Image (spheres, rainbow, N blue to C red):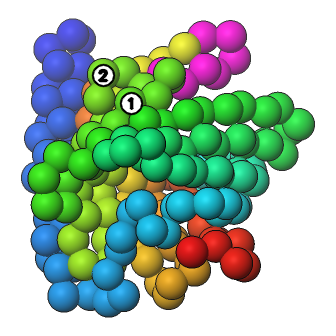
Amino acid sequence: MWKTWILLLGLGAGLAGCSGIDVTHYREQTPPLELRQFFSGRVEAWGLFQKRSGEVIKRFHVVIDSHSEGDTFVMHEDFTYSDGTRQTRIWTLHPDGPGIWRGTAGDVVGEALGEVSGNTLRWRYVLNLPVDGKTYQVHFDDWMYLLDENTLANRSYMTKFGVELGQVTLFFRRQPGQS
């Protein structure tokens, strides 16, 4: 039995590693995404989490206030979920070469890696995710696409041991008067 589980986990991890497209595929797409420019000031987002079956588990609203501190970019996110729970995450981001960002947050394991190309950002990290009194380390693979100067769409794939747990879909909107 354990040999079957190891084989299935290996196949899942292998398929997850082989699937997908490289972010540079979007290098010619416009408008170009300038991460610091889009998120500076106040941005709001609305989203939902779906299990891999497609069932919506939670909806949420996020208010993001961001600012620069020298080369460092700080994003303060306040989440309000449909069940009334609240959560705060503060990202500290650093540019690390053309189109590359690295970041940390209190519930992120280690460091997140972001790659920007054209209108697209791919953001990968491991998150400590609390569920029913337990905390699980899950992998997030976020794909963000700038639709226009004020709107960003985000599709996140959540996996554990290479197996998809679900997806998060978000729409970000810059608030009027933001630069």
Left or right, 110 with respect to 15, comes to: right
Left or right, 163 with respect to 73, comes to: left
Circle 2: is it few (<14), some (14-19), or many (20+) Cα within 10 Å?
A: few
Tags 1 and 2 touching, CB below 8 Å: yes
Q: Residue furthest right?
A: 84
Residue 104, which numbered label? 1
Of residues 99 and 152, the one drawn nearer to the viewer in this rendering: 99
- Label 1: which secondary element: strand
Of residues 118 and 165, the one drawn nearer to the viewer in this rendering: 118
Which residue is at a point 60% across and 67% down the rendered structure image? 172
- Label 2: which secondary element: strand
Residue range corresponding to the magenta coloring: 128-134
Image coordinates of residue 175 in percent, x first then y, are 70, 72
Residue tagged by mark 2? Answer: 110
* 132 is within the stretch colored magenta: yes
Image: 45 above or below 147: above
The first of marks 1 and 2 along the sequence is 1
Under mark 1, the amino acid is Thr
Magenta part mainly helix, strand or loop? strand
Which residue is at a point 69% across and 17% down the rendered structure image? 132
